[in-house]
Image (spheres, grey):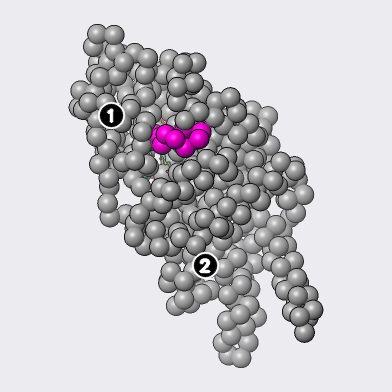
Amino acid sequence: MKDTIDSSMKSVKTDLYQHHDYYQIDALLSEDHILARDAVRAWVKKEVSPIIEAYAEKAECPEHLFKGLADIGAFGPSLPVKYGGGGMDEIAYGIIMLELERGDSGIRSMASVQGSLVMYPIYRFGSEEQKMKYLPKLGSGEYIGCFGLTEPDHGSNPGGMVTNLKKKGDGYLLNGAKMWITNSPIADVAVVWAKDEDGAITGVIVEKDMEGFSAPEIHGKWSLRASITGELVFEDVYIPAENVLPGVKGLKGPLSCLSKARYGIAWGAIGAALDCYDTALRYSKQREQFGKPIAQFQLTQKKLAEMVTEITKAQLLAWRLGTLANDGNASPAQISMAKRNNVHMALEIARESRQILGGMGITNEYPIMRHMMNLETVLTYEGTHDIHLLITGMDVTGLNAFK
Ligand code: TGC
Ligand code: FAD
């Protein structure tokens, strides 16, 4: 009897495995990719999945996970080891984001912000002293970071920002406010973008104890509830000259960090989609109506077949983007296409999966509603769905809809 169960389980597992990797993309992975994937997958299963629904329900950030995220190499996987990163390639970075987002988009957000929006700008635009001062501590999770670009009146159009720096002695006075900042209330350091007296966008590193700086929490989110979000408020905050990022001026500074993070989201969203699809597939094989599993109905099969097709297309897009990124050839417009397509795909799959589960789909017994609500944010942050469409439109027509 046990043998029969084991062999039937094996066939279910193989069956599911094939559906999750329909075009055998795993065969393209290196040993290092597989090691990273398996380690993060196991960590998410052990540390995130059992607690995430409760934290999301309480709208509380599981801060205790930061150390574990650092230990599995989720902060800056493709940055050099010397600077607190993982020394891996861009595909490993993508796979790690995918496995984290299989758990929760908010957990992936923690890692995206820390690695791609805080460590990366310091690594790319910082002085050697800044790198040595901040990066190892950010990589190990001793410091938490946040990234301040969006303002209350300047979201999609960050170039219009009014937060500003005025020369004072050897340093600057920082004034203004940022809005919707992931991790800000718990951050030790904030990479903040402000206009200098010539109107040039400049990056500065703000430390939590600086006088005149506060980071109140934003409450009432129905999305990304296990991630903490806040404002950044600057009232004559004195920024010493050594806290200014010397390596960049202009909007291309923050936008190039966004390229790095959007790339990770293009992979990450596939994780949320896979978790929804996996849940719906399993449920549909077990749930019976009219005397047979609902998976046997043609309309359910249509949903599942379309889901796996869309997931496979997204996986191939991410994979190709990863190979381009490894060669340093992934353009911002290519990254926009993948972010937009893959997040939208994941949100559609969450909605279809919810339908397959019927009434059970709206409960916290299953992860689908949480993923669906999270993905509403992912569709909007790091450039909205429509902004990315216009970036593609500009790329293919050569005409700029923003000017
Ligand atoms: P535009 O004139 O087009 O560009 C200004 C300069 O930037 C360069 N550039 C880029 N460089 C690197 N990467 C990119 N993705 C770039 N996009 C543009 C561009 O070549 C130019 O360089 P240069 O040398 O000529 O000066 O700028 P624009 O003002 O017309 O704006 C264009 C637009 C609308 C596409 C841009 O503003 C945009 O992407 N808006 C969306 C804003 C956004 O994505 N905000 C995200 C905030 S951070 C966030 O959401 C974090 S969530 C974190 C989490 O929890 O995971
Ligand atoms: P708006 O820019 O006001 O857009 C509203 C609508 O108008 C959208 O549908 C948009 O597509 C549309 N629109 C705008 N301009 C155009 C146009 N030219 N053509 C057509 N349609 C247009 N920001 C940070 O800096 N750091 C963070 O860590 C961060 N974390 C976030 C976490 C959460 C939970 C959320 C919700 C947001 C976060 N953001 C962060 C901000 C995020 O990047 C912005 O919300 C996003 O860029 C959109 O800006 P907005 O909300 O001001 O919307």
Query: Which residue position is annotated with label 2?
Result: 352
Where, quadrant-wise, is the N terminus in this rendering?
bottom right
Q: Is residue 18 above or below residue 262?
A: below
In the image: residue 183, left or right of residue 122: left
Asked if residue 157 can be seen in this view, the reply is no
The residues colored magenta run 138-147
Q: Nearer the viewer, mark 2 or mark 1?
A: 1
Report x, y in % for residue 44: 55, 54
Q: In which quadrant of the rendered view does residue 232 lie?
A: top left
Report x, y in % for residue 26: 73, 51
Sequence-earlier tag: 2 or 1: 1
Disc 2 is placed on an element classified as helix
- At 52% from the left and 40% from the top, the residue drawn is 70
Dot 1, crowdedness within 10 Å: few (<14), some or many (≥20)? few
Where, quadrant-wise, is the C terminus in this rendering?
top left
In the image: residue 114, left or right of residue 321: left
Dot 2, crowdedness within 10 Å: few (<14), some or many (≥20)? many
275 magenta-colored: no
Report x, y in % for residue 298: 63, 78
Query: Which residue position is annotated with label 1?
Result: 209
Q: In which quadrant of the rendered view does residue 142 lie?
A: top left
Q: Is residue 304 above or below residue 1?
A: above
Q: Camera-side residue: 104 or 194?
A: 104
At label 1, which amino acid type do we have? Asp
At label 2, which amino acid type do we have? Glu
Label number found at residue 148: none
- At 29% from the left and 8% from the top, the residue drawn is 170
**Ligand 2 quarter of the rendering:** top left
Q: In which quadrant of the rendered view does residue 279 lie?
A: bottom right
- At 41% from the left and 44% from the top, the residue drawn is 381
